[in-house]
Structure formats: C-alpha cells, structure tokens
Image (tube, rainbow, N blue to C red):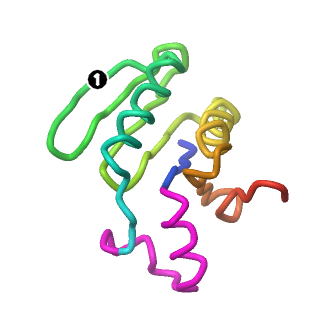
Amino acid sequence: MSYNIQVYTAQTMMAEMESESEEFFDNDKNLIPFSEKQIQALKNRLLQQNFEIAKEDKKGITFKNDNFEGMRAILTSNALYLRSSFDDAFEIGIIASELADTGEYAKYDPQADGWEVLGE
C-alpha cells in the first residue's frame, strides 16, 4: 500500500474550502496553477531533499528518492504529488509540511482528513 500527499497553491486550498464540493479535485480547472517561479522553487526544494529527477516531459517532472524505497514525487503545473510506502509516510508528511510552512503552498493529506492548516 502507498501513502499519498499533495501540495497545491494556497489559492487552490481556499477555492476548495469555499466550494464545499466533493468533486473539486476531479476537475483540473479548479486547481490554481503554480507560477514558473514556484515550480522552480519546488523543484529545487525536492532536489535538496535528496530527490533526483527520473523523468521530465510535457506533463511534468517525476522525481525519485533512493533513500526510501518507492518514494516518488510528480511536479505538474497544478500540484506536487508525493507518494511513499506506509512505512515512509512520516517522511513525505514532513517534506510536504516544510514546503507549506511559508503559506505560499498548502498540504493536502487525504488520509488525514484533508488540509493541514498552520496553527491548528
């Protein structure tokens, strides 16, 4: 089994909370895209966290982290998707939380009831 966490723009979080729709994430048009600067910053942060680029194409950038078996990240224009085994769920949770700590990005953990809001 795998553990999945997503990182979105803070604006996407606000839009999802306001929509109250259970199908919000099913429509890519609901996701506020990252700026080019944000994509580059997220890419650099992942590289600093021992991720390596495995593949880069028009859909996005796929990363792997050989320090943890099965840990992957996919950076698209709309979201950063992190996946690991359940054994390494804590590590991707920390990575996503650190990315979201500035308030520019928002961590969404579907296994832990959704958004991580700072100060809660």
Q: Is residue 19 left or right of residue 33?
A: right
Give the total number of marks visible in the rendering.
1
Camera sees residue 1: no
SS for dot 1: strand
- Residue at 52 percent across and 85 percent down: it is 21
The residue labelled by disc 1 is: 54
Using the rendered image of the protein, determine whether residue 110 is visible from the camera's viewpoint: yes
- Which quadrant of the structure image shows residue 30? bottom left
* Residue type, numbered disc 1: Ala
Q: Nearer the viewer, residue 83 or 6?
A: 6
Front in this rendered view, residue 85 or 95: 95
Quadrant containing the C terminus in the rendered view: bottom right
Q: Where residue 51 sits: x, y (%)?
A: 44, 21
Q: Position of residue 68 (x, y in %)?
A: 54, 20
Q: Which residues are magenta?
A: 9-29
The residue shown at (30%, 44%) is 36
In the picture as drawn, the residue positioned furthest to the front comes out as 37
Left or right side of 58 for 45: right
Instruction: Give the prevailing secondary structure in the magenta stretch.
Output: helix
Magenta segment includes 46: no
